[in-house]
Amino acid sequence: DAEITQSPRHKITETGRQVTLACHQTWNHNNMFWYRQDLGHGLRLIHYSYGVQDTNKGEVSDGYSVSRSNTEDLPLTLESAASSQTSVYFCASSPGTRMNEQFFGPGTRLTVL
Amino acid sequence: SQQGEEDPQALSIQEGENATMNCSYKTSINNLQWYRQNSGRGLVHLILIRSNEREKHSGRLRVTLDTSKKSSSLLITASRAADTASYFCATTGAGSYQLTFGKGTKLSVIP
């Protein structure tokens, strides 16, 4: 069955380190998204991509970057992790249609000490 | 900034009762969606209603949309303990694939 996976599921890192969170989907969806979820804020969009080599900034993109070299993967990189980036991160994908239901991964809980 | 705002923030009901959650948004939309999130899990899509629709049903779910008031409601009938979760509304603007989420309603269904 097609699915969307994230790894690692849990990560503890130190301030200043570079961290990459992986997202992989097997639906062949054009659109992929990264969100962070924090208490009191709901889900906020970090970056998104509408296809290979396409990346766009979302609402809270500072300190994060993404790259899209193939359809299946959209890794999220924290260039220099900060304590404010402690959060739960969700990846999602959707087909490139107007009926844009998104399919979410299980999430990665990141703690920056 | 958040587009949708759910109300109430938390709701506790007895099994068998109906649960109603409301969502308000600020700008014009293409469609509005509702998602469920069980504790520690990812979000799962429940239902989508287009901007030109007023009501939609799916099983025990009923969604209404009032674009003049920029609001939507999600009704879960005959609730079950398994419905315990957080529920989020999300909106999409014209020509966009992006979703803007509200902060969610935490529903507890007591057996």
Image: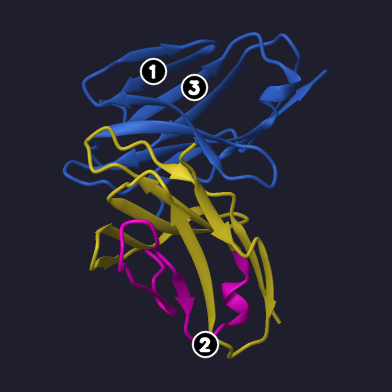
Chain colours: A yellow, B blue
Residue A98 location in percent, x, y?
22, 35
- At 56% from the left edge and 83% from the top edge, which residue is drawn? A81
- Residue under circle 3? B74
Identify the image quadrant of the C terminus of chain A: bottom right
At label 2, counting other C-alpha atoms closer than 10 Å, the crowd grade (few under 14, some 14-19, many 20 or more) is some
Range of magenta residues: A59-87
Q: Secondary structure at mark 2?
A: loop
Residue B85 location in percent, x, y?
66, 33
- Residue under circle 2? A80
Q: Using residue A17 as the reference point, say whether residue A60 is left or right of it.
A: left
At label 1, counting other C-alpha atoms closer than 10 Å, the crowd grade (few under 14, some 14-19, many 20 or more) is some
Residue A82: say if magenta.
yes
Kind of residue at badge 1? Thr
Q: Chain of mark 3?
A: B
Q: Chain of mark 2?
A: A
Between B3 and A19, the one nearer to me in the picture: A19
Kind of residue at badge 2? Ser
- Examine the rendering and report whether any part of residue B104 can be seen: yes
Q: Are marks 3 and 1 on the same chain?
A: yes
Mark 2 to mark 3 CA distance (whole Å): 41 Å
Number of the label disc, if any, that sits on residue B64: 1
- At 31% from the left edge and 67% from the top edge, which residue is drawn? A68
Mark 1 to mark 2 CA distance (whole Å): 44 Å
